[in-house]
Image (cartoon, grey):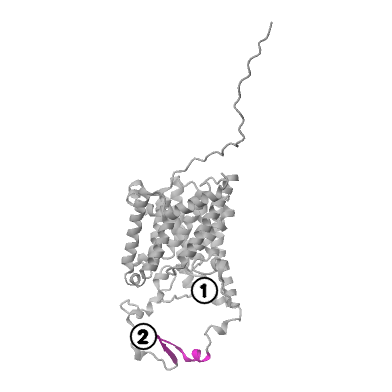
């Protein structure tokens, strides 16, 4: 029998183009994170404008909660965003991980440059340069598990303040003031050696399954526990060390608190009606200036100092320079939980507040989210609003100083309106879009 050959089956032509990488499904946006970020940016508005009393049990003092805690919430959310950019609760690997790290590097460079520009306005201490450096430092930890990240963040919360204290004492003994990277890491309002713990904490939070209600509830519970432990420990440590903070501290730059780390005896130097003596003044004949040298300035103020100091021409601290470290005095900087004190107690307590707020925002039911939609919209363009408020503070000048509450209200109202309108008609904020587009192109230059 003759066999008939079957015709060959046509095959598709082989393409020289490699197959496209699989596209990861886009995760739904977590509205609770946007809401928490919106609260953080509004809190920073308040920290930079409001003059508040020391926070205490009186509800009229509770506005002081914005000091210190708002920027810490902002830094913790930076870590959460870092996790979401690199896979969420399932960290990416391989080429996707390299792309994510490149995007973060480009973002950090852009944010650092923006921070340098905003710092030139000289209106407030800008956090963006520190924020950018901390993003880069966190890159090696993108593949770490939440448990390891939480352990590392906790260890740095203990070690970081001690390292900063020791190094700053060394710098003082050597009569050296840190600049550049050393200034970012060990000095200033946001010392990186302490603040990296907030970013790593946020990175660990972002590695959790934030869509789970159980995880959200645990964030609230753990946050409440840390807040109580941190602030109670700060109060107890300050009492044990006998630390009494300056009762005339400008509360707008870091209010002290009788129940968050200062001594109740601080109020003894206030007048009986609770007024600040600096506001009322004291009669001139009650002050002995016989051993003082006074210097009037062009604005009518007079500054006086002991004659022994002015005659010698030396600062009272000069005698201590070069004598080494005074550990007994330096240890007092590690107690209490004052805003921006950088103590372990402040780190733990403020981290707890951040976790508590993040958990509550994620748990917020839909009716609450609808009411707070403008705040969440502000959270989607926090970088833009932060930059705008720095410029507004600079342009406001003396007018801002005389109308702090009004200016804060105008800032918040303007930010919410701009955020809602911009998000509705234009989508992503202008600076957010710039950073996103440039970082994505930097991560995929040849694709």
Q: Report the span colored magenta.
A: 292-312
Q: Quadrant of the N terminus?
A: top right
The circle drawn on residue 51 is none
Which residue was labeled with disc 2? 300
Measured from the top left, where is residue 98 in percent x and y? 59, 48
- Above or below 326: residue 107: above
Measured from the top left, where is residue 351 in percent x and y? 47, 59
Please give left or right for residue 317 compared with residue 417 in the image: right
Quarter holding residue 301: bottom left
Q: Residues within 10 Å of mark 2 (few under 14, many from 20)?
A: few
Is 225 in front, or is 273?
273
Is 336 in front, or is 156?
156
Q: Given the current orientation, which residue lies at the most extreme bottom position?
A: 290
Residue at position x 57%, y 68% in the image: 182
Which residue was labeled with disc 1? 332
Q: Secondary structure at mark 2?
A: loop
Of badges 2 and 1, nearer the viewer stands 2
Measured from the top left, where is residue 291 in percent x and y? 45, 93
Residue at position x 56%, y 57% in the image: 136
Q: Given the current orientation, which residue lies at the most extreme right position?
A: 1
Please give left or right for residue 317 compared with residue 369 in the image: right
């Amino acid at each position: 029998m003759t066999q008939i050959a079957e015709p060959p089956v046509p095959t598709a032509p082989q393409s020289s183009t490699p197959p496209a990488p699989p596209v990861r499904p886009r995760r739904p946006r977590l509205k609770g994170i946007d809401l928490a970020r919106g609260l953080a940016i509004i809190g920073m508005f308040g920290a930079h404008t409001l003059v508040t009393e020391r926070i205490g049990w009186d509800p009229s003092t509770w506005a002081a909660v914005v000091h210190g805690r708002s920027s810490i919430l902002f830094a913790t959310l930076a870590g959460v965003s870092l996790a979401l950019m690199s896979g969420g609760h399932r960290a990416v690997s391989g080429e996707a991980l390299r792309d994510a790290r490149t995007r973060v590097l480009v973002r950090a460079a852009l944010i650092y440059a923006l921070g340098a520009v905003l710092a030139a306005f000289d209106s407030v201490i800008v956090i963006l340069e520190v924020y950018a450096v901390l993003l880069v430092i966190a890159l090696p930890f993108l593949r770490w598990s939440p448990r390891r990240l939480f352990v590392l963040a906790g260890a740095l919360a203990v070690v970081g303040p001690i390292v900063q204290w020791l190094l700053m004492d060394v710098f003082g003994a050597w009569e050296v003031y840190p600049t550049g990277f050393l200034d970012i890491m060990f000095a200033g309002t946001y010392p990186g050696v302490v603040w990296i713990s907030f970013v790593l904490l946020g990175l660990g939070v972002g590695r959790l399954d934030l869509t789970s209600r159980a995880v959200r509830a645990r964030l609230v519970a753990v946050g409440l526990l840390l807040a109580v432990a941190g602030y109670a420990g700060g109060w107890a440590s300050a009492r044990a060390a006998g630390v009494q903070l300056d009762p005339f501290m400008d509360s707008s730059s870091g209010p002290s608190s009788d129940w968050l780390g200062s001594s109740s005896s601080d109020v003894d130097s206030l007048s009986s009606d609770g007024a600040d003596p600096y506001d009322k003044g004291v009669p001139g004949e009650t002050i002995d200036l016989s051993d003082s040298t006074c210097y009037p300035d062009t604005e009518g103020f007079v500054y006086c100092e002991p004659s022994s100091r002015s005659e010698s021409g030396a600062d009272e601290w000069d005698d201590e320079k070069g004598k080494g470290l005074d550990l007994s005095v330096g240890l007092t900087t590690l107690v209490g939980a004052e805003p921006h004190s950088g103590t372990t107690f402040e780190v733990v307590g403020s981290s707890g507040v951040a976790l508590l707020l993040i958990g509550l925002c994620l748990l917020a039911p839909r009716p609450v989210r609808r009411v707070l939609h403008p705040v969440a919209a502000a959270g989607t363009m926090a970088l833009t609003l932060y930059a705008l408020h720095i410029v507004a503070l600079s342009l406001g000048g003396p007018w801002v100083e005389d109308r702090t509450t009004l200016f804060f209200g105008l800032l918040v109202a303007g930010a919410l309106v701009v955020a809602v309108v911009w998000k509705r008609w234009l989508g992503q904020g202008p600076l957010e879009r710039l950073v996103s587009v440039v970082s994505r192109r930097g991560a995929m230059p040849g694709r």
